[in-house]
Image: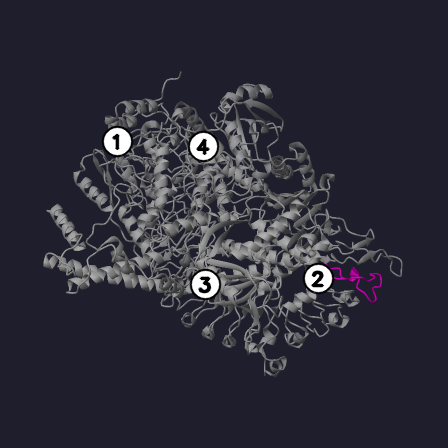
Amino acid sequence: MSSPTDAERVNMRREKHPQIEETFEEHVHNAMPKFKKHYALGITTHTNDEDDDPRDHRQRGIHNPNFIHSPNDPRPPLSQPIKPRFSVHGTASNASVFSHGDIAPVRKTSRAGSLFKRLAGKKSTTSLLGTEHQQRQQQQSSNSLVPAAGLRRKMSTFIHGGSGSQSNESRGTRSSIFFPSTSNSRRGSATSTMTSGSRSSHPPDTPPITSQQQEQQYDQQRQQRPETREQEQKPPTLSDMPIVSRSPSFFMLDTDLNNLSDITNIISATPKNTESDEVRSTGANKTLKYPKPPLSSHKSTSASDLSHHKAQWTAPESWDIEEDANKLLATKRKAKHHHHYHHPQHPRPPHRKHYSNFSKPIEDKAVVEKEQEPPEKCPQPISTDSNDAQGLEIAKPIDESSGIQHSASTQSVSSFSSGATGASGATGKQIGGDQETESTISTVGEDEEVTNLRSIDSEQTDDTSFSKFDEEYDKAEYQLEKYYNDFSDVDLNRRYAIRIFNIDDTFTTLSCTPNTTLQDMMPQLKRKFNVGQGSYQVSLKVGKLSKILRPTAKPILIQRRLLLLNGYLKSDPLHIMGIEDLSFIFSFVFHPVATSHLNYEQEQRLSRGDFVHVDLRNMDLTTPPIILYQHTSDIESLDVSNNANIFLPLDFIESAIKLSSLRMVNIRASKFPANVTDAYKLVSLDLERNFIKKVPDSIFKLNNLTIVNLQCNNLERLPPGFSKLKNLQLLDISSNKFVNYPEVINSCTNLLQIDLSYNKIHSLPVSINQLVKLAKMNLFNNRLTSVGDLSQMKNLRTLNLRCNRVTSIECHAPNLQNLFLTDNRISTFDDDLTRLRTLELQQNPITSMVCGGNYMANMTSLSLNKAKLSSFSAELLSKLPRLEKLELNENNLTQLPPEINKLTRLIYLSVARNKLESIPDEISDLRSLKSLDLHSNNLRMLMNNLEDLELTSLNVSSNLLTGFHGSPAKFFASPSPKLAKSLLFLSVADNNLTDSIWPLVNTFQNLKTLNLSYNNFVEISDLKLQNLTELYLSGNNFTSLPGEAVQHLRSLKVLMLNGNKLLSLPAELSQLSRLSVLDVGSNQLKYNISNYHYDWNWRNNKDLKYLNFSGNKRFEIKSALDPEGKNDLSDLGILKQLRVLGLMDVTLKTSKVPDESVSIRLRTTASMINGMRYGVADTLGQSDSVCSRDVTFERFRGREDECLICLYDGKNENASSGHKISKIIRDIYDKILIRLLEKYGEESDGIKRALRYSFLQLNKEINGMLVSVEDGNTDSGLTSADLLSGSSATVVYLKGKKIYTANIGDTMAVLSKNNGDFVTLTKLHVPAEREEYERIRTSGGYVNNQKLDGVSEVSRAVGFFDLLPHIHASPDISETVLSYSDEMLIIATHKLWEYLDYETVCDISRENKSQPMSAAEKMKDYAISYGCSDNITILCVSLDKSVNQQSQFTLNREDLISRKNTFEDTVLRRLQPEIAPPTGNVAIVFTDIKNSTFLWELFPDAMRAAIKTHNDIMRRQLRIYGGYEVKTEGDAFMVAFPTPTSALVWCLSVQLKLLEAEWPEEITSIQDGCLITDNSGTKVYLGLSVRMGVHWGCPVPEIDLVTQRMDYLGPVVNKAARVSGVADGGQITLSSDFCSEFKKIMKFHKRVVENQEPLKEVYGEDFIGEVLEREIHMLENVGWVFKDLGEQKLKGLETKEFITIAYPKTLASRHDLATKNQNSSVLNDDLLFQLRTISNKLENILSSINGGLIESETPGNSSIYMTFDKNTKDAVITKSTESDWISFLDHLVTRVESTVAILQLRQKLQGGLELYTSSDSTMHKSVFELLDEILKIQTDQKQ
């Protein structure tokens, strides 16, 4: 048995003698174990004396140990290498704090001291869960439930007592996050691993610590703290060196100054010199006092830490991956000794953060602390820098049951539970160092922690909490870190295969255990490769970079982690995968040790240069070439990027006396490059895309730095020395790990631009105001919750806060011009920004804009897309005199105010996707307006005086337009119609326009693009626009295309005529020599192409790139020679520019068809696959090449029940040669899948496994080809240009009744249902997605401008060799069982989803469910009409094989067009027509919104938006399920259905849709609309709560003369209304008549299903049976649950009614919640009547003591006060409304209060109460005698 290490001895001794913990902490500093640097808490050093020359201690090859020791220690021997110092920090009980970085010089510390050091730097340190904060939240929560303040006061007094009563406060249960330790805790113990922010574990007598108590402790400790201690020695200064003062406009090389275009008039200001604060630190036994540097409470390691000798150089740290593995594995071995302490972790509810107090510093602090908490059982970072003492803590394990829907990719994130839960003692990520260490985390007491956390979660309210999305987002990084860095599941005794290559590309395969090091492998490798006794080493090559591995590296663990990062799972056979060739991901290369040298080409390139600007990129160097040493004095800029082993020796740095710019991008360094800080004249330093964890404090020596780029590293803080960089102007520290804002940069007062994007910063400190010269600040994608005062930042011009969590902003920056707040949580905006020009508030829950602010005076651009606006203030428009651009897309606006004419400078106006019903005529006064976008609204007519506008672009597609105001004659009569001359782009697609509009269209003589698709045009002969280049006429009723009209279109390049009724094409089309796109698909073409004198033949249109004939089933292309007999007229090969040729369903009788190739996409198949119809539509857009490929395999593998549908979308294609990778994928993927399906079997798990491995194998094949390209082999046809090219892919495998979908990238698949729902089968893989972004960062990549490494728009794809391992091809896989309701499968590339949402796509598919080709074309045409100009490919498959049945319920085209005038909404027009009013027995449904009156009074603006959402859902579902809207009253609906099943399924679906809707934040912030979940976490209530009631009967129908709609009268209607009145919000109440009829229908259905009886025999008619059976299928898909409410007395009805309550099956838990609420309800009818009785009794008693007489209190006479008689009570209940009951309660409470007050006053003043009775004696003591006795007892107790 091995002897224990020093750390173990310390722990064992501490356990035995906890009272001497301070002694042991000192001992650990003095006798430190020899661990690697990052295993320990950092290297402890002391700095040089002031008279020492700092240059004497720099890195020169080997460590200089003279300066590596503690101030308390003697200096170690000169020969001893550097040893890191290990400090065991004492921690507060249950709140241990670990951190990274260097620790301060040694001093004695206490447990509490080490804890409170982490609080230094913030004024407020109270807990988020503090007692006062709890009470404040509870008060706010309770106040939001009652509308009237007076009533709240009365109810509170009545229920809880007066103000004199002592409040009931729970003590000792909730406390602040931090609290003093009352026991000796140690790191790794159970008590030291509790999550910060959870319930504290105070001893019974220890009260919670409040913020005031903490401040008092601070003050006391400062006074008691001894002044004498070992002082820290300051690092040497460079005061004697000249500091170059540079102007703010001076920038050096490699700087993109485009982002500084708006920096003007920089005001020079003297930076404020803030005094050095003192950090207070408290401990359990002692106090300390020490000065505080600008950022952290400790000094970082000085420059002398990097001291080396010059003679011997050792290679820099190896590839970052190997560093984590050694420590984690060592941890696992140690953890095995403690496994018996482990208790299984139970899942717990997630923590919630309060929305209402985001702006409070303490809450930000709490979030910061929570943010840094790694899960207890996943890898936990061992502290490497005590600077982290400002608030990093260890988090509880994450709830592993959340958030995973798809099976494959989520395995990589969610399969943690298998390996991680069982890892009892796995420690976390530990970086760097030279030796191994063992560290243990005990798991004793975990169950108690979980219990405490659960109790806290149960106390937190939902109405002030973070959304569940935020909780999952914050936890994702820890889940991923746990998955990729936890090696606890590794079997240390298992042997793994690994392939090692030699330099001649030969290889050998070894079998090793995970602990095997390279040093152990070397003898075996030498034998295998038969080499002599030379010096050899192994390099790891990933992509184009090779990194030399250290002898202590463990290749098995490196290989394992790289496989995981590339999409393989821990459940995969990783131990045998090393047998295969994995060089497309990585490779290990065995080679001799040799210095780097240049090849001939590199030498020539270098020698031809001037040695002023030296470029050494991608040369695989370890040191600078010898040739450079001759010219070092000339070098001004040096670029050594992409050299993974590069090292710049000190002598080289010292001799480069002119070096001002240094780029070391992507050198894979995990440490700051040595000796760089000695290049004193550096002006620009670029170290982006590395793994640097810490910047040395010696950075202060580079005082001339102007530009610093540290993008994409692992920085968590910056050293204090950073504050000395006074000349710094541009700083980029984006894509790092900052949780706290690095305050040290605030001392760099000359900063002009700073980029902090893609970090996790929660708050901005007040000290940021020191940056008085800062012009641009980028905080994109952080976690800011509020922005405070920035009023001192006089020069701040641009502030980017996109993608944060900001709820409030009050920055008051005086000169701020551009403010970007997209995707935040701002509900109101009213900041005082007088110079503001651009304001982006997209994707914020704004319901109204405040008009009182001063931020509008100079505004030129305002964006409010995707907000919650239901109206736009006229007053607001009057305050925007300089506005030039206004965007209001995707809101709920119904009109624009006439005051819009005050925007006299407006150039661009977009109000698309709203509900506009009209446009004010005043808009014609906007003479500067150039672009107007009003698509997807409900406009019937445009405004008057349209001709007065000078528009260049007008888009009014998807409206209800039938024409324009006035007549064309009026337009022509205008003296000079400006619009006729200016308009260039006109889109009026999807409207009701007819041929009468042609004269008006012809007036736009300069028109370039005209889109009139999907209107009612029949003739085109009147069109005469000679300058037209693009014409879209799809989806009309053209039967012919006149040649005369075509002759007028000589400039035409694009002609879309698909979806018409064309029989032939005129020969005049051949005269359109510029024509490049012609789409005539889905027509009725039937003509002879050889008759080219009269009909069109393509041979003269040589510029055609896109030609589509698909869908013309009667069209034939047959071979025929021209009259001269030389040329075949059917030859399509003459079109040399052709890229897409669509010939689906076309009869081909010629062989002159071009073959499918990289540059051509050819479709010749029939539109049927396995009996299902399918269709394809695509467009090239602005692209000149084919990048998307669709392919289908009917009867896949020769099986009748299988088919394969694939769509590949190429990314970053080569414009000249097309997208090669997508073509290769199309050719080889099916073969890969067939092979793997045979291997893994036919079961569901086997199919999923085969699909996943097929993508991984496909990626291996593609990248294998790209590797050969990198090596100079071009046999595959790929070139070096394809190394940054790849493809997303979606594969749909249908087998029987199951659909298996696998996808990578952004090609999405959706399953449309006939009940209005849809299912998303794929998952979006883009860098901005939470899990994708965290994985990218874990692998070393970054995200810039929403692109992975600034290149790829997707985070998963096949190919992209140069982006490995940041991108991979592991797919998400879903499995779906087809049901009766599934109608159509839609697969489309990403551009479609940018312009059409899922709901619109599914509406189009339902409208064309029997014609998938038409559906696909319509989706494409809609996207084009909305503005899409990129390539799109859409594939639609109709899943119903019964074509006749499909056609039975499909509208013909004439019916569809005639409907267009009958609908009031554009969206409803795409759905089924409204049914005829049902008569006879019908189902009457009444709906009503619960507490709507109260909500309208509280949030009128929010309710306007909410009501629109509510009405849209109601009406949309009515069209889908076949209901008739009778009428509405306010927010109440009355609806009629012909069948009980359709009524019930409509009610159930509406309840589900209301739960999924996006409601305004105001609605969800109060009790009536907040999120409520059941015990299983299922969402039960959210937003508006609607009650419904259904009754079945025969009402009296009558036509309303005003509305011309059917109305229903009679007792059936009355009963239905009363039934709905019984329901609570979210309930559906059913009458007994309805239930009886429903049961009959279900009995019929049972006969059909079980007995197989024919429909006609069961239902009487086939049609009725088909309708009912279809509705029952829909009902079964939704699911329902009935609950008996019992007999209820309905208002106004004589007899009681037996009521049943219905719920959707998924919301059955609503019943339990409703019952619970009803049982616990404080207010109901009986209670009010009882309260009235008590009030009457009290008033009667009061009357008696005033001199009146009453009878003695006898049981027989008391009944007269009890209640009304039954009839009176029922009458009151019937006539009273909700507001009446509230008023009644108010009245009763007032009576009781006043009566009791008078009685109490009399009691105290008179010493008793004299009661006059009608008899001389009473049987019982009066109530006042009892009161006297009670008061006397209470008085005695007080005395």
Q: Quick one: label 1, few (<14), some, or many (20+) residues within 10 Å? A: some
Which residue in the protein does label 3 denote?
1693
For label 1, the residue is 183
Amino acid residing under circle 3 = Leu
Q: Is residue 1791 left or right of residue 1095?
A: left
Q: Residue beneath label 2, please?
A: 1058
- Label 4: which residue? 421
- Which tag, 2 or 3, sits closer to the chain's start? 2
Is the residue under label 1 in contact with that under label 4 (CB below 8 Å)? no
Q: What residue type is labelled 2?
A: Asn
Dot in front, 4 or 3: 3
What are the residue bounds of the magenta stretch?
A: 1076-1104
**Residue 1071 location in percent, x, y?**
76, 67
Distance in Å between CA atoms under marks 2 and 4: 58 Å
Please state which of the two labelled residues, at mark 3 or mark 1, is closer to the viewer: 3
* Residue 1741 in sight from this viewpoint: yes
**Mark closer to the observer (2, 3):** 3
Local packing at callout 2 (Cα closer than 10 Å; few below 14, some 14-19, many 20+) is many
Give yes or no for residue 952 being in the magenta stretch: no
Look at the picture and state if 1295 lies above or below 1166: above
Q: What element carries label 2?
A: loop
Does label 2 or label 4 sit earlier along the sequence? Answer: 4
**Picture coordinates of residue 1237 (x, y %)?**
66, 35
